[in-house]
């Protein structure tokens, strides 16, 4: 990837992290290896979610969300 965009937002008591790049992307049927599995496990251990946008051949786009605790 030559360009990467990371955007942080707080929406409805959740921290939303949007990531996109202009790399080769990741096919929908790609096998998850240790690096991605470990990243998912860390996100899930904090009650987060990880969503990939469908493969278009135009880079990678994903959304990570974490619930914020009420204070």
Image (tube, grey):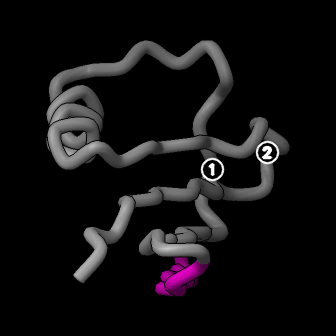
Residue at x 62%, y 46% (from the top left corner): 25
Majority secondary structure of magenta residues: strand
Q: Residue at x 78, y 56 (%)?
A: 58
**In the image, is 63 to the left or to the right of 59?**
left
The residue at which mark 1 appears reads as 24
Sort mark 1 into few (<14), some (14-19) or many (20+) by Cα contacts within 10 Å. Answer: few
Residue 42 horizontal/vertical position (percent): 16, 43
Of 49 and 60, which appears nearest the observer? 49
Q: Is residue 10 shown in magenta?
A: yes
Q: Is residue 27 above or below residue 44?
A: above
In the picture, the quarter occupied by the C terminus is bottom left
Disc 1 is placed on an element classified as loop
| Quarter residue 63 falls in | bottom right
From the viewer's perspective, tell me whether residue 64 is left or right of residue 68: right
What label sits on residue 57 in the rendered view?
2
Residue 57 screen position, x and y as percent:
79, 45
Residue for point 59% across, 79% down:
11
- Relative depth, front residue between 4 and 54: 54
Image quadrant where residue 60 sits: bottom right
Q: Nearer the viewer, residue 53 or 31?
A: 53
């Amino acid at each position: 990837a030559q360009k990467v965009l990371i955007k942080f937002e707080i929406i409805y008591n959740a921290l939303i992290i949007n990531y996109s790049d202009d790399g080769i992307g990741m096919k929908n049927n790609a096998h998850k290896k240790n690096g991605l599995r470990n990243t998912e496990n860390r996100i899930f251990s904090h009650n987060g979610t990880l969503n990939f946008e469908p493969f278009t051949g135009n880079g990678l786009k994903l959304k990570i969300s974490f619930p914020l605790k009420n204070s």
